[in-house]
Amino acid sequence: MSTPAGIPAPGSVSFAIGTSSTQAATTAPESKVDMSLDDLIKSRRTDQRKEKKRDNIKSKTSGGANGKGPTTGDKAVGKGRAKRSAAIAARRGITNSTAGGNKPTAMQVEKETYRQQRKRTGGKQNQQQGGSRRGGKTEADIKGKKKAQAAQKMKGQQQQDGGMPRPPSKKALNAAVRAMGDAGFQVPKGMHMVISFAPSKQGGGQQGRG
């Protein structure tokens, strides 16, 4: 018995098993829906650990945790400076016995790396302290400058008034005390005499001589 064209013979039917794209796309969400509460918590914790691990790797490559460690650029600059220093030392006859020839030691490379890191972080801190620094000057520098300007102004005013008057000499003070004693003045018991002088507003005046 013959079969029409395009129709398979009995017992020889062929078929294929596969998955469609829509079924594959919905497999993951459906699998999570079917999971129990404990399995969901465990899966979420695993995802969080993976994300945290990726963040730690990024922070290390970009300068350590919180940017406190040396960056890749700091290491490159430090290594280059250490090589130049070792080459200069070799030309001067100073060689590193541990590294050999004009090669820098690991300690020298590390030293130059952290020196570059301090230079970089110090520059950032100076930029962040814009409120306490004005044009590269600290608050203490500004206060000191104002104090010096005030002293210079006072000195100029005294020169205009005839110069800073000299206080009377010790001989003149003793003469004044004797004159008061000759006039009958006696210092009360338990007290002592204090004589003070202050420049007048007009300035000038007779200068005492010792």
Image: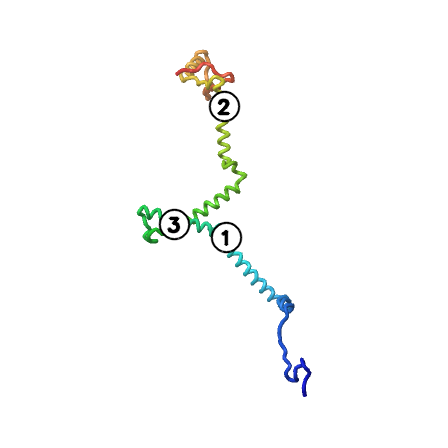
* Contact check, label 2 and label 1, Cβ < 8 Å: no
Secondary structure found at label 1 = loop
**Residue 24 visible in rendering:** yes
Left or right? Give the position of 189 relative to 9: left
Q: Point out the tag, 1 or 3, that comes first from the N-terminus.
A: 1
Placement of 74 over or under 175, stated as above or below? below
Tag count? 3
Q: Residue at x 55, y 59 (%)?
A: 51
* Contact check, label 1 and label 3, Cβ < 8 Å: no
Which disc, if any, is residue 202? none
Q: Position of residue 209 (x, y in %)?
A: 40, 15
Q: Position of residue 149 (x, y in %)?
A: 49, 27
- Extreme residue toward the front, this view: 5
Q: Residue at x 50, y 26 (%)?
A: 150
Determine which residue is flagged by label 3. 83
Crowding near the residue tagged with mark 2, few <14, some 14–19, many ≥20 C-alpha atoms within 10 Å: few
CA separation, marks 2 and 3?
58 Å
Which disc, if any, is residue 154? 2
Q: At label 3, which amino acid type do we have?
A: Lys
Determine which residue is flagged by label 1. 62
Q: At label 2, which amino acid type do we have?
A: Met
Q: Point out the tag, 2 or 3, that comes first from the N-terminus.
A: 3
Secondary structure found at label 2 = helix
CA separation, marks 1 and 3?
24 Å
Q: Nearer the viewer, residue 101 or 135?
A: 101
Left or right? Give the position of 6 relative to 90: right
> Foreground mark, 1 or 3?
3
